[in-house]
Amino acid sequence: MLRTPRTALPLAVARYVVPAALLLLTACSGKKDEIPYVERPVEQIYTEASNAIDNHNYTKAALLFDEVERQHPYSQWAVRAKLMSAYSHYQAMKYDDAIAALDGFIALHPGNRNAAYAFYLKALCQYERITDVRRDQSTTEEALKALNEVVRRFPTTPYARDAKLKIDLTRDHLAGKDMEVGRFYLNTGEYVAAIKRFRRVIDEYQTTSHVPEALHRMVEAYLALGIRDEAQANAALLGHNYPGTVWYQDTYALMNRAAKGEKPSFLTRAWDWMF
């Protein structure tokens, strides 16, 4: 899982946290994940929720912020509480609940000053669920989509700047998945399928760290198929763009062995990262 430091609250939200000394706090009681309806001033509920965040009790905080919205749905506090509930779920790593709350906030308040933060927090919920490349990468695809949405909608914000950095990492992760699958196909002799995966890395993830290896694997696969012209073309492309890499060194040695009629050994350095 890719984890980042817990995101801070947007200033427009944080400034409304009411000092605890000013108000009487009421303890949260009742069944788990449930707060009995006891009518209270909005400031009191909001302050109790804010104190729950301070105490890292994010589940309680989310329930209390939801209570603000339930008891005072037409107040400005309810708008802020909706976003704070999502933030609390995010802090508790309850990403589905956070995304649901954020979708509600965005749908109801698309022009709110904290809309950029809502989109960004939604992207983080997807980003932090990115899993090992051996697993399904649908969440990674969703993270990339959400991060691109932040950049598209709010290009001049600090959220967009951070999203751009995470987009690069996310794309590198997706390329890594294709490389992992391509190596598997190469190892099992399914060379055409392997070439398709490596070609996708080269064409769609050109700025990632996986491209030099992808070119080298293309050379391996084409040599295995006996298509030396394509192997030579990819070797030349690798030498032109990445002449100082270990992958070019391996490709150079591989092509020399092939020129001498020796049977090439494939998947050099393939699994070093696994052990």
Image: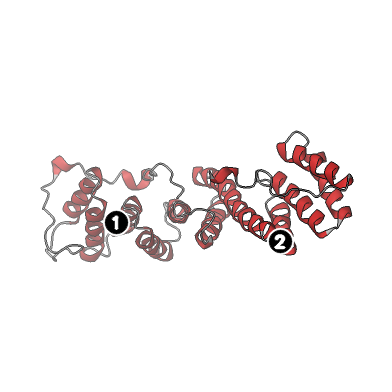
Which of 244 and 270 lies nearest the eye of the viewer? Answer: 270
- Which mark is first along the chain, 2 or 1? 1
The answer to whether one can see residue 11 in this image is yes
Residue 265 place in picture, x, y as percent: 74, 48
Quickly name the residue at label 2: 189
Label 2 Cα neighbours within 10 Å, binned few <14 / some 14-19 / many ≥20: some
In the image, what residue occupies the spot 43% across and 66% down? 107
Query: What's the amino acid at mark 1?
Result: Ala
Give the percent coordinates (x, y) of residue 22: 14, 42
241 sits left or right of 188 in the view: right
Q: Nearer the viewer, residue 182 or 85?
A: 182
Q: What's the amino acid at mark 2?
A: Gly
Where residue 81 is drawn, which disc sits there? 1
- Which of the 4 quarters of the picture holds residue 28? bottom left
Compared to 165, does 134 lie above or below? below
Q: CA distance from mark 1 to mark 2?
A: 57 Å
Q: Does 108 sit left or right of 201 as displayed?
A: left
Residue 156 in view: no
Q: Residues within 10 Å of mark 1 (few under 14, many from 20)?
A: many
Q: Secondary structure at mark 1?
A: helix
Image coordinates of residue 226 in percent, x first then y, are 85, 58
